[in-house]
Amino acid sequence: MKKPKIKSIPYDEFKDNETFEKLVAELNAKGTNVIVRKLDELIDWGRSNSLWPLTFATSCCGIEFMAVCAARYDIARFGFEVTRNSPRQADVILVSGTITTKMAPVLKRLYDQMADPKYVVAIGGCSISGGPFRKSYHVVQGVDQIIPVDVYVPGCPPRPESFLYGMMQLQRKVKVENFFGTTNRKQKDPYRKSMEEKNEELYNEEEQA
Amino acid sequence: MTDIQDQTPAAGAQNQPQAAANAGKPAAPAAAAVKPAAKAQPEAPAQPAENQIEPRFVEPSALHAEMKRLRDEEKMDFLECLTGLDWQEEGLGVVYNLESTATGRRAYLKTATTDRENPLLPSVSDLWDIANIYEREVYDFYGIKFTGHPDMRRIYLREDWVGYPFRKDDDPLKENPLRMTNEPLADVTETLTLNADGTVTRGENRIFGDGDYVVNIGPQHPSTHGVLHFRVSLDGERIRKIDPVLGYIHRGIEKMNESLTYPQTLALTDRLDYLGAMQNRHALCMCIEKAMGLEVSDRVQVIRTIMDELQRIDSHILYFSCLCQDLGATTAFLYGFRDREKILDIFEETCGGRLILNYNTIGGVMADIHPNFQKRVKEFIPYMRKNLQEYHDIFTGNVIFQNRSKGVGVLTKEQCISFGCTGGTGRAAGWHNDVRKRMPYAAYDKVKFNEITRTEGDSFARYMVRMDEILESLNIIEQLIDNIPEGPFQAKTKPIIKVPAGTYYSAVEGSRGEFGVFLESKGDKSPYRLHYRATGLPLVAAMDTACRNSLIADLITIGGTLDYVVPDIDR
Ligand code: SF4
């Protein structure tokens, strides 16, 4: 497994390369299967260049997100332009804007509705830590309290360039993943019940009635 | 250019006792303001600040009759602002700003109750439609219950929230952990009726019945322009009723202000309605400056005016883009954003920011204009005029758009006034409500411009008003851009800014209506109460009326043309 390569920026110009090197070393620790890795690379190349974001914006940062989607900054160059209105079709949620305590359960639910593998990018001071509203009684102090975050993009609002940089960091992350056996692993659905359990419940209900 | 005139904690306070006296009420809240006056220098000029208001105290029992008289006899048909307050010992109360749209006369009233356990005040929601939602806000923040109000529910906070966060003695964080359960949404609400003998009867009011077919639109929906939640009851495809659920982006800005110093409070205004960042901040700066008697130079006034107008164009272009996007015209969206970037470039050169600009300060602006500023703006004016024609070519004439907007979502002039829908929405129905004309500020009295109005009041008229306003804004900028007077860009202020005790109200014409700042000061370095008249709240309140019996698909067009920005509604 090698370093993740992004066409538009040389590897050394990225910040936070240590984290990546650590991640790569960890993944390589047990050795890699050449064939599976080659397949992984192919799939990850495709995945990283077609990350579909969910149209989700609560406030100011969302307007900058719209600007990034528009002609000048043109997010389509990176394959992110397919914004989805339904979480079920999206790969990545860009949390752009303040998350209030009333919104928190809704955000969690949106995240739960997304299909795996899924990513979260926290855009702007507000979603990283509460930002200018950290002292408020109604603002969540960082979305990482509710959902796991992959990339943080600081700023208030971040400049479009930082948006793109953050998204490229996400691409790098996607590129080093082991798709087979790790990322596409089937998770156990915590809500799913086996037939016996369901029968038991019905039985109990009937008994009570 | 003057420094702070050494005016005056006394200035306003001396007038207030009269207000209290004529109400004949010993516990009148105004009386508290007298205290600082005693220590003020006697030579201080005793005229109140330009934007000072002295609300007249009315007993709660007499309030409704008095309000009815004002509305019917003095034609005070516009309830501009309704602010809840916690005067501590003097009780919990409300300040009303009224205006007559016919004569332009204004009136300020206040009322209060000392009962903190079970505060009751009479509702005026039967006189002005907008009072319904304003009073719910006061209930949410202060726990004041309004008798005669049809729907005493919280509006921003969750229904299971404990306590009333804006009360001075409430600690909102103590009993309100982050709740990750789904929020409860009641279908039945409480109404209170005050009987003649002073007892209160509880009644029930059903928002949605069992047979209603209710669809949730939002909070996560691409065309509600943010996290807004409508509960819509449908009859086939027709809308029967809309119940807006707000507060998904309620950031408690007004409460935070009470613990910030004045220069710090400025930072949050940009984040309210981020498409009116300049104007919002302008309003707050102006309110504080006038209250302190601080004079700003002509240069600043002109710069602020130009910036406000650029911001308005920016906002209207975004309005166009988003409306097109919502109706499926993606190309038009890109056109709009292309032109918007030009304005952002101009902003960026001078202010350093693209969206959140932090430009106005108390007494001036953060930095002088960039040497390129005039050149860039002058290039922009003809460019925009040309491109506006393009907008009309690509979108306005489109048959689908015309069919979906003409005659749809009509708000009449009376409804607009009763709901307080200022800005383009009110002007599309023929209500002349432009603050720039009603109460000129900055350099607006020096320029010639037309107030764009139409009479239809439908979605199409609202759209056209905005498009024509872009042209008007360009005209204003054109008149000013070559005549920016010389002078300092920042007046000297004391290191710690204190506003003399009193109550103040200032308003500017924001991108989508009247943006008002209500400031109550006790003479400290942070405000006692700072309330913003949100431009978007009346628009959302009017959604129910505007959408009744329209098709569900038209909800998107109507919402789009009303042009609200959600963080400004929720504050
Ligand atoms: S980080 Fe700044 S720009 Fe972004 S949502 Fe928060 S306040 Fe707005």
Image (tube, rainbow, N blue to C red):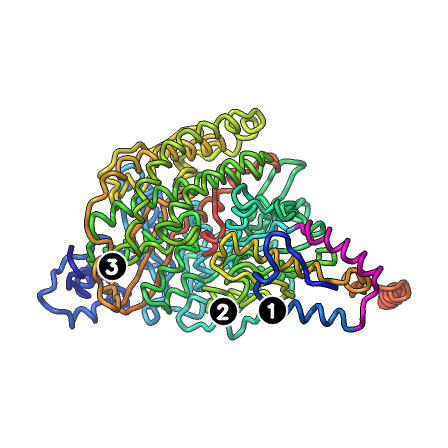
Position of the N terminus of chain A by quadrant: bottom right
Residue at 33%, 45% (x, y): give it: B307
Instruction: Report how far apart the C-alphas of labels 2 and 3 lie in the structure.
Output: 31 Å
Can you give x and y, in whole percent of width and height, for residue B153 in the image?
52, 57
Mark sitting on residue B163: 2
Quickly name the residue at label 3. Answer: B23
Instruction: Report how far apart the C-alphas of labels 2 and 1 lie in the structure.
Output: 24 Å
Can you give x and y, in whole percent of width and height, for residue B364 in the image?
26, 55
For mark 1, does the 10 Å Cα neighbourhood hold few (<14), some (14 to 19), or many (20 or more) residues? few
In front: mark 1 or mark 3?
A: 1
Residue at 41%, 37% (x, y): give it: B424
In front: mark 2 or mark 1?
A: 1
| Magenta region, residue range | A30-52
For mark 3, does the 10 Å Cα neighbourhood hold few (<14), some (14 to 19), or many (20 or more) residues? some
Q: Earlier in the sequence, mark 2 or mark 3?
A: 3
Quickly name the residue at label 1. Answer: A145
Q: SS for tag 1?
A: helix
Kindly indicate whether the residues beneath marks 2 and 1 are on one polypeptide chain.
Answer: no
**Parent chain of label 2:** B
**Parent chain of label 1:** A
